[in-house]
Structure formats: structure tokens, C-alpha cells
Image: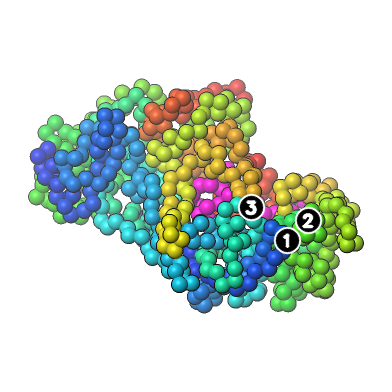
Amino acid sequence: MTKCHCRNPLKPYPATIVKIIDETPDVKTFQMVFDDPAVMESFRQKPGQVAQLSVFGVGEATISITSSPTRKGILEFSVKKVGMLTSALHRLEPGSKVGIRGPYGNHFPYEVMKGKDLLFIGGGIGLAPLRALIDFVLAEENRGDYGKIDIIYGARSMDDLCFKYDILDRWPQMPGTTVYTTIDRAEPGWEGHVGFVPAYLEEINPSPENKYAITCGPPIMIKFVLQALEKMGFSDDQVITTLELKMKCGIGKCGRCNIGSKYVCLDGPVFYLSQLKQLPPEF
Amino acid sequence: MKAYTITRDNLGAWLDALARDYTLIAPVREEETVSLFKPVRGFAEINLGYTNSTVSPKGWLFPQTEEMFFFSTGGGQITLADAQTPGPAVLFGLRPCDIKGILALDPVFNGAYQDCYYQKRRQDTILVGLSCTRVERHCFCTSMGGGPTDGGGADLLLTEMDDGYGIEVLTPRGEELVNRYQQYFDADRENRVIPAREELGKKLAGQFTRNVDTTGVKEFLDQHFELPYWGELARRCLGCGICTYICPTCHCFDIFDQSPDGELGVRSRCWDSCMFSHFTRMAGGHNPRPTQKERVRNRFLHKLKYHRDRYNLDGCVGCGRCVTRCPVNIDIRQIIADLQEVARHD
């Protein structure tokens, strides 16, 4: 029996919420800092990874890390209020104490993406994990490694657009970056595109040449986005998505997030479409 | 490999001594029909006449409910304190299938993220196996690569003989334990122990009421995920989860907090079951395994394929507990046979 020298991976580190940004009526972005600066320094997440957030007394939930590792000293989690833990998080205020453990899971293959154009396709809160990679490739120290960046993002309504400061102001200003925004139904004050993300994607009709497409959103959006990408000639190895499954332990023990013999918390959440097609259809 | 013998009287004295020096976990008959492993104060509480405990002994290494740590949120600070873990223990009287069950749990709780709770208990626990003396009608360990006298994985293996018990030393840790209590043991001068155990093994091998052939089942499942068979099976399944609670290799758990006053609390984990509808249901309502069909399929694929894919070990050790206890007689041996049949007609 191997002796266990590790730190207990099921025990979170105390952290403090330093800022809360209201994104939409039911999504907030929480900026968090570990209470121990040494933990903050040693927490090295990669874009696409997740963490377990604790509200002590309520429990834990798996949340994707939405800030890029290029942004030091702070972690961001964008959380939609859907269940007990996320509702408890939404009730907290700046200064509140939480727990964080992780980072868990694999990450977007940013090494193999070097030299390629990137097409991001996000829907609703699905932009949260993509944002970690978008900000990573747009960071000054990495920007030269990647080609053109296209971001297609949609939500049900103007109110439901997350990260408005990024999609409407910051990202469009970045060199070699185009942001396409859409909402499902027209509403007063919106002068942009109207329609569902997969249809907008088909309108834009991006070429698959030298490109990776990275998508995340509600399951129904992903389904039609994958079909549209296939129609445009993207191969299964050029399409990457993240899977959301209920996770509890985050470390492949509790047996909850399996798809076949894979665990999303260890072997995912990031999968190439070619890998997804090898898995049983249970997600 | 060294072997010793011990008389029945000395076995009692040795177990009493073990109970004084260690936490001794041994089979106990709790009620008429329930036997289980639990801490005992001495030999008098132990029931060595059992064939297979109702609940598997995995609960010593992976308790049904286990406190992980305590938290305090007072004064605007979070303070975490580790829960107490038990010290040196002897898990006594393990049947060979249950030892194999522990070997199937080991890689789950090991790996890139070591589970400190399991690992600590596993390191601190000496495993003493006990060869079977009977074969129950639901036993099928020989079909799953085991055998009623295969003690592999234990530190010591005891086998009942005419005039007491034979003890085989299987690991250095087992040897240390024997050395510590050598006044109770006699050297196996006539080399009787191993032949006696082999003889018993041969005798018991002929007593299995049902042998199943697992050949090709995993390979068939590799190729076939959708089978109408799972739907038929699921129509009977009540989703009660008993199969997962008594299974020596099931390891699913839930994590939960309790904090009556909101400031002091404890985070624990407890056994959970993939047979339950909420197990994979997400906060937003999406459930990738929405009906009992998907859940039944997941459990049996886990036993017959997924565990092997991931750890190169069967997820079933043939203890037969799930067969005995299933209220609607779902029988994994029949499932294996049925899958063979489906494969033949494929």
C-alpha cells in the first residue's frame, strides 16, 4: 500500500469573496482570493479546469474557473443560480468566506492550438469556461501564438448576456478579434443580430481551414452547433467542447460523473468531438 | 511461505489479545439474519461460523458515513479541523471474496489524487483472511477468478482444520503480527496447513450450485451499449439500491455538510447509489440517466466492463450478496448468462 503523502484533496482552502459582479438576473461573477497567499500562488489552473466551491454548512458544487491563469492573484467563478449551493452563493456578499479546492479536470489543448485560428461559440452561461481560454489566448504574452480569434456568443435576451463588458467593449477592441453577438428574440434597444446561435453560426459560415472550434452552452445549442460545424467541413478533431455532468468529489472516487469508464472530473470536462463520439451517449 | 497452527483455545486467547492491542473488527451476528463486521471487545463476540456477512466488510476502510473534517465559520474566519481517524486495526475473518473486494477498491482510492481517509485506514489495518468452509447457494467467486480458499491480498490466511486452524503468512506485515503473538502459535512442522487448505479448496470447488462463464461478455459490452435487454431488466428493478450498499466493490459516495447552529459544522461523506434517480440529476434539472433502464445498465456495465477498463480488475468478486438480497431476484449470474445468449444471437 502506497503511503499517502499528499495533502487531503477533499479538504478545501479558505477563501474570501472580494467582489461580486451582477452579470444577468440569475448569474453573478464572484472574484475570490485564497486567505493564504501561498495557496493563491500555488493554485495553478489551466483554461477549462474546474474547482469545487464550498459554502460551509450548505455543501459543495463544481464550478468552472472563468478567469484566465494569466490573470494572477484572483480567481473568478461565474455562477448561475440553479440549485441549493448556487443559491447560497448568490446570497453571499463581498467579504464572505468560502472554500475552494482544485483545480480539477483536464484543460483546453492550448498547446496544440498554437498557430491556429480559434472560433469560440458560446451560449448563455456556457461562455464561462470559454472565457478562461479566450482571455488566455488574448493575453499579451500569448497573443502571438494564435491566429485570428472569432467569438460567436448568444443568449435569450439582452439581460441574459454574460460578460457584457467583455463581449461588447473589451474583446472587440483586441487586435485580430471579431465578436458576433446575438439574442434569441428582438427587443427594444438591441441593434445587433437576432436569432439562435447555431443559425447565426451558419450565416457567418466560417471556414474550417487551420482552425479549432470551441463550443459550450446549453445541450440543445451544442447539438445544433456540432451539426452546423460538421456541415461547414470541420473535422471531429477540430471541434472541442466541455461536458457538464454532476460531480461531487472532483477526483474520480465518488463515481458520479462517469460516462462509460471515463470520469468527467478527471478525463474531462474538455473533449474533442472525436472523443465524444467514442463515449456512450450518456451526457 | 511460513505457516503455523493454532488450537481453538489459543485462537480465542489470541483474538482477546488482539482486541486489547488493536481495534479488532470481526464478523458478528447482529440479529437472526444479519451478520456484519464491527469492532469487538474479544473472541466471545465473534461469529466465525458465518459463510458470508450480510454487509461486506468494506465499511471499515470506507465507512457508510464518515466525518471528514469539522469547520467553524465564527468571527469572520474559516477554521478547518481534521476528524479523528482510527489507529492500528486488525480486520479479522475476511472471506476470500471480500479480500478481493478490497483489492478492487484500492485503485479507486489511490491514483493521482489519493483519498487520505481510505489510505490512512488501509495502511493502519492488518487483513486476516479466513478460508470458507461452506459454499452458499448464491456464491460464485470461482466464476470471477477467485476461490473459497484464495487468500491473496490478505496479510494472513486462516483455514479451519480438524484440530484448530492453519495460519499462512502472506506478507511481512502478517509475519510481524504472528511474531508479536508467537506464544499462541505452533510451527507447522508436519507441513499440514497448505495441503489442508488445498484439499478444502478442491472439496468446496465442487459445491458451487452455479458457475457462469464470463468469457467474451466484456468484449460484447465494448461493442454494444444499447440493448433492449437493459429495458427488460429495469422493468423489474425497484431502484432500492440494496445491491450497491452490500456490494464489496461499490464505492460511490455523497458529500454533505451538517451545521445545526450555522457556525460549527462537519462535512461528511456517506455511501450513495447509482440506482437512485437523483444520483446524476444536476441542479438545473438535466439528468443523463433519467430512467431505471440507464441506471441498471450503468451498474452492470460498471461491474462487468467499466471497472475492468479503468483498473484492469473485475468490478464483481462473486460474493453473491446482491443476488441474495435483491427483492425482485435480479441475479448478476443470470445477467451474465443472458448477455452470453444475446451475444450468440447477435
Q: Residue at x 65, y 69 (%)?
A: A20
Q: Is residue A79 magenta?
A: no
Q: Counting residues from the N terminus, which is met first, the one under dot 3 or under dot 1?
A: 1
Q: Is residue B133 left or right of residue B4?
A: right
> Residue A155: which disc?
2
> Residue A24: which disc?
1
| Residue A221 to residue A91: above or below | above
Helix, strand or loop for the magenta stretch, by majority: loop
What are the residue bounds of the magenta stretch?
A235-261
Count residues near mark 3 (Cα–Cα under 10 Å), then give few for <14, some for 14-19, many for 20+. Answer: some
Count residues near mark 2 (Cα–Cα under 10 Å), then give few for <14, some for 14-19, many for 20+. Answer: many
Cα–Cα gap, marks 3 and 1:
13 Å
Q: Residue at x 44, y 38 (%)?
A: B244
Q: Counting residues from the N terminus, which is met first, the one under dot 1 or under dot 2?
A: 1
Taking the view exactly as shown, the residue that stands out farthest to the front is B261
**In terms of image quadrants, where is residue A71?**
bottom right
Instruction: Pinpoint the chain carrying mark 2.
Output: A
Is the residue under label 1 in contact with that under label 3 (CB below 8 Å)?
A: no
Q: Counting residues from the N terminus, which is met first, the one under dot 2 or under dot 3?
A: 3
